[in-house]
Amino acid sequence: MQAQPKDELYYRAVARLARDWDETDPADRAQLLADFPELNGYGLKVDDPFDPEVVEREREVIDQCRLLDRTAPNEDAAQFADEPNLRDQLNSGAPAAPPPPDVAAGLRKDARAAVDWSAKRQAPKEVRMANRFRDVARRRRVLAGLKSEKELATGIGAHHGPDSEPWDVLHIADPLGNVITDPQHIKQALFVRAQAVERLKQPDVDEGQRAFLQKILDTPAHAIEAKTLLKTARNYAQMNPKALAAKKAWAEKHGVSFHTVVFDKRKGKKHSGHTVYVAPNTLAPTTNLASMQKVGNLGDVLNAVSAPKG
């Protein structure tokens, strides 16, 4: 039997299977990879993480919406909820009619978006950041900077922030002094600090409340801006004025101390003679190495930023 030519419907089905891979039973994955070789292009594996509750939760939401006579929030799920299995459709042998040109263009766009989404989902932060730049040298500088940030976060037992945060590394503790590294718990702790800052500005706060709120803000919280010198001959680190303003506004909102750490990873005559520099409680357009503290190792960075303000 001659194989049917692969059309846009086929590739759209492949893109959907790839997108829903974490909802696909591992027992079916090996057969899917054999039936649809294109899935291998997404970097999918049989032993990838699987959440068996996703499909059940999705169907429950759809059923609840139907009972309430409302449109399901996940329209895509509702659309495919009662359809036959995609693999059965494609293996039925019935030739698929070619879609109209405008529909075909939309299908190609969806397929490309699915491929891009799959690639971005699996890429670590340093790869996503570096891929923004076409210049190879710029990519290398970005990767080196992110490597320094990760080393610092590991060295002081802190959290390495995502791209969306104004800080690179955050060391924050709960009221008992335990360091928080879980992203959700960090968000909660920052929310509480922001509420305490706002409440202290109110004139109706009595002394007892003020002492309680201040105790919240006295728990350790250190945001760090990390800079890495690689090629420049200048012995200082610079910061974009717009980014600087955003960092200062964030620090004021959450009552968090902001510090600058510079890694000198230059080679040859350009190297300053030391590797790790710290400027506690400092955020400035230009931070000169001569005005910063030299620390022997990454663990000493936390001691430097935790020291009482003098």
Image (cartoon, helix red, strand yellow):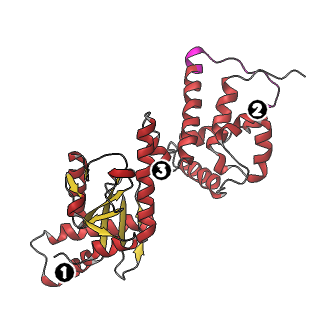
Which residue ends up furthest to the right in the rendered image?
1
> Considering the image in quadrants, where does the N terminus appear?
top right
Q: Nearer the viewer, residue 208 or 44?
A: 44
Q: Is mark 2 on a helix, strand or loop?
A: helix
Decide if residue 29 is on the left or right side of residue 205: right
The residue that mark 2 highlights is 89
For image coordinates 39% across by 66% down, the residue present is: 186
Asked whether residue 132 appears in the rendered view, the answer is: no
- Badge 3 amino acid: Lys
Front label number (3 vs 1): 3
The residue that mark 1 highlights is 209
Q: Position of residue 277 (x, y in %)?
A: 30, 63
- Badge 1 amino acid: Gln
Label 2 and label 1: CA atoms lie apart by 66 Å
Q: Nearer the viewer, residue 103 or 251?
A: 251
- Badge 2 amino acid: Gln
For image coordinates 76% across by 36% down, the residue present is: 87
Quadrant for residue 255, please give it.
bottom left
The residue that mark 3 highlights is 125
**Cβ atoms at labels 3 and 2 below 8 Å apart:** no
Mark 2 or mark 1, earlier in chain? 2
For image coordinates 64% across by 57% down, the residue present is: 51
Front label number (2 vs 1): 1
For image coordinates 44% across by 33% down, the residue present is: 134
The residue stretch that appears in magenta: 90-104
Which residue ends up furthest to the left in the rendered image?
203
